[in-house]
Amino acid sequence: MAPHERAIAAVVYNPTKITRDELESAVAPVALAAGFGPTLWLETTPEDAGGEAARRALAAGAQVVMAAGGDGTVREVAEQLRSSDIPLALLPSGTGNVLALNLDMGKFTLERAVDVAFHGITKKIDVGQLVLEDPDGHTMQHTFLVAAGLGLDAATMEETRPQAKQKVGVLAYAEGGLRAVVKSKRTPVHIGIDDRRPFTEKVHMVLVANCGSFPPSLVLLPDASIDDGILDVLYIGPRSFWGWLRLWGRVAIDNRIILHQRSSRRGVSWRTWKSKAFEYARGHSVTIHPENPLPCQIDGDTFGDAARMRFWIDPQSLAVKVHTPTA
């Protein structure tokens, strides 16, 4: 960039989640004060969930790319920014904002998130990669930032009504989850992790995660870290309604303990209690192969049924803007 040229910031936003006027009122004064030139505004469309917009931002020479529009938009933008060293900044919108939650920015206002975009520090995080094979044998590679998997979690997202998400936000998933649990059946799933011997478990779901917290503030994988180069695997298989009650009761208890131990990075590990209904593993690469195809999801977006999913990690390949920790 020539000395007389001002830096460029880009905003990729989903207009069905947040308006340009809302964003511009927060971004414009901060960008001007930080010495940036006019902001590049890029809308997502039904044909482009954010990937093409992010490529345009990079081609224009943007020094920071802000994403506003939910986890799907964030994933599409991140896929293009991966390995570019141009940082991704998260602006709150959409339902989940799960990546922001795992970067300790889940409750940030739009104004505070914009301040982080221009004045925060840059952190490198891991990015998950997967190849999804559908029942017809077709394959497609995808990026994920938070988690992907198959079974009950994907069925929950399919059962959650968009109108309910608009009215009550992430609480809508509780209603969808109840309907999905009633319909869910334990299915044999073959699981391979790194070069260990593959094994088979009868489960309701398998989740492969890059980080451990999920909305509203539920820690499912306390050992997971978004920059440790490791995938965390969770598979759940209660046999009965009472098994579900015991499972979620224990999750609730351990989350209360974790909240009291937040000053300790790792908190409480699920391995402190034994349960065949809730199993946990870690690895650099993971393959899951259900005996019968199951619905799958990637960062909260459903992708139909999967016959096989293969995962690996791309360590510290994405730059993100995070807030400066206070002493």
Image: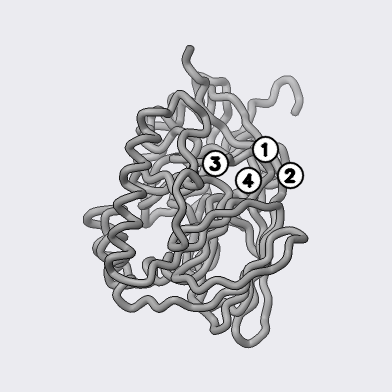
Label annotation for residue 86: 1
Residue sitting at the far front:
274
Residue sitting at the far bottom:
136
- Reply above or below: 46 against 234: below
- Reply above or below: 1 against 77: above
- Mark sitting earlier along the chain (4/2): 4
Q: Nearer the viewer, residue 53 or 197?
A: 197
**Crowding near pointer 3: few (<14 within 10 Å), some, many (20+)?**
some
Say whether residue 20 is left or right of residue 118: left
- Reply above or below: 157 against 62: below
Residue 314, given in percent of the width and then of the height, sits at 71, 49
* Real-space Cα separation, disc 3 to disc 1, in angstroms: 28 Å
Classify the position of the N terminus by image quarter: top right
Q: Nearer the viewer, residue 97 or 253?
A: 253
Residue type at the position of mark 2: Ser
Q: What residue sits 64% from the left and 69% below the top?
A: 199
Q: Nearer the viewer, mark 4 or mark 2?
A: 2
**Crowding near pointer 2: few (<14 within 10 Å), some, many (20+)?**
some
* Real-space Cα separation, disc 1 to disc 4, in angstroms: 10 Å
* Real-space Cα separation, disc 1 to disc 2, in angstroms: 8 Å
* Real-space Cα separation, disc 2 to disc 3, in angstroms: 25 Å
Residue type at the position of mark 1: Ile
Q: What residue sits 77% from the left and 60% below the top?
A: 195
The answer, for residue 68, to whether it is visible in the render is no
**Crowding near pointer 1: few (<14 within 10 Å), some, many (20+)?**
many
Residue 10, given in percent of the width and then of the height, sits at 56, 40
Say whether residue 9 is left or right of residue 19: right
- Mark sitting earlier along the chain (3/1): 1
